[in-house]
Amino acid sequence: MNTLLTQIKFILFHKSFMWLLLIVNILGTAYGYYWYGWQLAITDPIFLIFVPDSPTASLFFSIALFGWLINRNFKLIEALALITLVKYGLWAVVMNIWTQFEGSPIGAVGWMLIASHFAMALQAVLYIPNYKFTWKHILIASIWTLHNDVIDYVFGQMPIYRSLSEHFQAIGYFTFWLSIACILLAIKVTKSSPL
């Protein structure tokens, strides 16, 4: 078992694999912004930055990953990447599965979204050894994340899932606590850091 874990770790942190992962994340980020195109088209310009949650999270991770490849740590971006990638990765998994249970079959695209968003959250956790952010970076990333929740659920800019619209308040409540859990994860990463 230890040998397998060592091999997985070797692959994950090998520069060739990390470059490939960067390319995949850049393509996924671009597709994510494209996916949100119709919602962005009907969004008030003041809210545009807060609407495409998942692609912005993967953009943060792409920048962090690029930093690691050039031996730099963009600490604030790393904190934003960990918190938002885990949050929106898991959020999309839950929303798509919930949509399926509400009687709206999600089809192949929906299952692709579940798999890709779970992979987003997973990669954020797998690269925990690379994060070098500090408390101040967590504080700023936390403000960004919770402010985004307010924009989404107070100002009505959340991703649109028509079949779940009647559960708006429950989704907002779930999202808030998911944000808190992801912030606590970042705090745990900082506490366990040798820095």
Image (cartoon, rainbow, N blue to C red):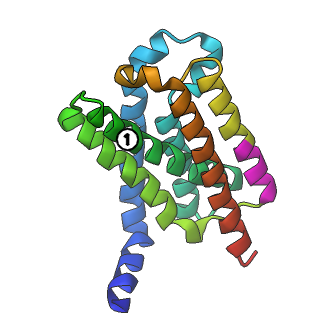
Image height of 63 relative to 105, above or below: below
Q: Quadrant of residue 17?
A: bottom left
Task: Give coordinates of residue 80: x percent, y percent.
Answer: 63, 48
In the image, farthest residue toward the right = 136
Task: Give coordinates of residue 194: x percent, y percent.
Answer: 72, 79
In the image, farthest residue toward the left = 108
In the image, farthest residue toward the bottom = 2
Q: Which residues are magenta?
A: 135-142
Q: Is residue 37 magenta?
A: no
Q: Nearer the viewer, residue 92 or 56?
A: 92
Q: Nearer the viewer, residue 153 or 19?
A: 153
Identified at 24% across, 27% down, the residue is 104
Identified at 50% across, 29% down, the residue is 52
Image height of 96 relative to 66, above or below: above
Image height of 160 relative to 10, above or below: above
Query: What count of labels does the image hold?
Result: 1
Task: Give coordinates of residue 91: x percent, y percent.
Answer: 46, 42
Q: Nearer the viewer, residue 46 or 113?
A: 113
Identified at 65% across, 67% down, the residue is 189
Task: Give coordinates of residue 149: x percent, y percent.
Answer: 63, 32
Q: Which residue is mark 1?
A: 28
* Dominant secondary structure, magenta: helix
Answer whether residue 159 is visible to the viewer in this image.
Answer: no
SS under mark 1: helix
Image height of 78 relative to 1, above or below: above
Q: Residues within 10 Å of mark 1 (few under 14, many from 20)?
A: some
Q: Quadrant of residue 133?
A: bottom right
Look at label 1 and name its amino acid: Gly
Q: Where is the N terminus found, in terms of image quarters?
A: bottom left
Answer whether residue 14 is visible to the viewer in this image.
Answer: yes
Q: Where is the C terminus found, in terms of image quarters?
A: bottom right
